Image (tube, helix red, strand yellow):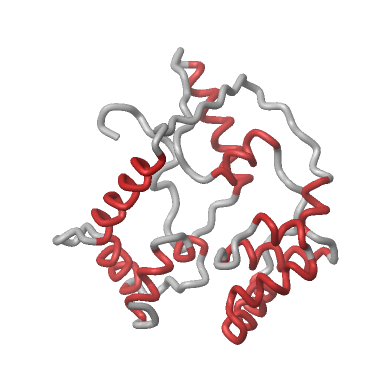
Amino acid sequence: LASAPHHLIDIIDPSQSYSVMQFREDTIRLVAEISARGKLALLVGGTMMYFKGLTDGLDDLPTADVAVREAIEAQALRIGWPGMHDKLRRLDAASAERIKPNDSQRINRALEIIELSGRPMSELLARRARTELPFELMSFALEPSDRSVLHRRIATRFDQMLGASDDTGIVAEVARLRARGDLHPALPSMRCVGYRQAWEYLDGTID
């Protein structure tokens, strides 16, 4: 962060949500501003969902509905997310095939779309029209030839995040967020991998 300007980091409060549409609009605007300064914009890391939203355009999917999501989560409490994944497989086998049985956020969204639209998410995604970007985008993936090297680095990074002896570890961070009193596990920020498990650990539901 000190050596190069970074964008789209620490831009919203954890109580807020940030959509792929917002990311796409912000990215296109920022790339134009960076290019106008004679610089080259680099899109680095992150989730492929946002990258695909940028490159392939946005889906014509129904917006989130809090009541529907809460009903899905209530059912998940009774039968578990693997059970909800089985339900999704019956309703939308194509989406279930690419979503893991423990990916609660994506299972919830897929079932929400079915409930709101009456159509499988895979069918709606297939109708998406590809949109052109106002700039040329070149994609690269850097990965070690020995994937065990990557796995060790991920494990080391996780231990560093979890085991920080001071107040910089992820458990301490989530404890501070919980103490605010305005956050809850259903928020997108708290459903992220790592935050969700730290919240459950502080709840005493996992070791």
- Number of labels in the image equals 0
x, y percent for residue 129:
80, 37
Q: Nearer the viewer, residue 90 or 33?
A: 90
* Quarter of the rendering containing residue 118: bottom right
Q: Residue at x 25, y 66 (%)?
A: 172
Q: Residue at x 78, y 63 (%)?
A: 92
Which residue in the rendered view is the most extreme toward the bottom? Answer: 78
x, y percent for residue 177:
34, 67
Q: Residue at x 37, y 78 (%)?
A: 206
Compared with 78, 146 (above or below) is above
* Quarter of the rendering containing residue 89: bottom right
Q: Residue at x 24, y 60 (%)?
A: 169
Q: Nearer the viewer, residue 43 or 83?
A: 83
Which residue in the rendered view is the most extreme toward the top? Answer: 38
Task: Tell me the quarter of the image containing the C terminus.
Answer: bottom left
x, y percent for residue 65:
68, 68
Task: Tell me the quarter of the image containing the N terminus.
Answer: top left
x, y percent for residue 18:
54, 52
Compared with 152, 140 (above or below) is above
Position of 131 compared to 143: left or right?
right
Q: Nearer the viewer, residue 66 or 42?
A: 42
